[in-house]
Amino acid sequence: METILLQRLKEIHGIVLDNFVSVTEATELWTMPPESYDGSQTIRDDCDGFCLACRVLLRRQNIPNRLVYCEIGKVGHLVVEVEGWILDNLQKVVVPNTLLSDYKWLRISGFEAGDIWHGIANF
Amino acid sequence: MKESKYTRSEIIRALFAMPTVLIFGGISACSFIEPETFKVGEPVPAPFGCVELLERSALGDC
């Protein structure tokens, strides 16, 4: 049975993804969504923009979350993680991290802005 | 030839039921795939994009 948390994650993932246009960036420039962001504005960015937008909405619902840097093949990618559930602009739905066997999980942020990042010990 | 204890129609019904059982069994199994909490290891540098964002914006959240 789906938990309330998972329902909320799916809702947020869906809201952001519905108004997300994937753009390939030439430079590694992370951009926060606008201050008024509520999920209805279109975000034109790559994975980091998607993640930062999700983070805004997750924070608004007091859902602790972390950013996870990974590699798919040799390509770097960023996702948001909540208790092992992954919000990812490359996935149509929220998925458990255990299902993404081709992702190489490398670094994880803290829960708060500016927290130290750590390596991942168990994947 | 030894007679089967099952009728022809029972055998055919069982054969058609097998895929259904396998499919629903597979669907049930997938719905039980649980995530695993990431365990943190040693401190590492933040991705460059994050470092730059925090330097540039007080609202940076990474």
Image: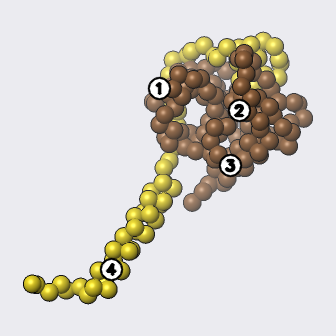
Letter of the chain shown yellow in the rendering: B
Residue holding disc 2 = A51
**What is the crowding at mark 4: few (fewer than 14 residues within 10 Å), some, or many (at least 20)?**
few
Task: Of the two numbered discs 1 and 2 on the same chain, state the one appearing first in sequence.
Answer: 2
Does dot 2 land on a helix, a strand or a loop?
A: helix
Chain A representation colour:
brown
Same subunit, tags 1 and 3 = yes
Residue holding disc 1 = A121
Task: Of the two numbered discs 3 and 2 on the same chain, state the one appearing first in sequence.
Answer: 3
Instruction: Give the Cα separation between the discs numbered 1 and 2.
Output: 22 Å
**What is the x, y in percent for residue A48?**
70, 27
Residue holding disc 4 = B12
Q: Observer-nearest residue: A21 or A12?
A: A21
Q: Nearer the viewer, mark 1 or mark 3?
A: 3
Residue holding disc 3 = A10
**What is the crowding at mark 3: few (fewer than 14 residues within 10 Å), some, or many (at least 20)?**
some
Q: Amino acid at mark 2?
A: Cys
**Residue name at image x 77 percent, y 38 percent:** A20
Instruction: Give the Cα separation between the discs numbered 3 and 4.
Output: 42 Å
Which chain is home to disc 3? A
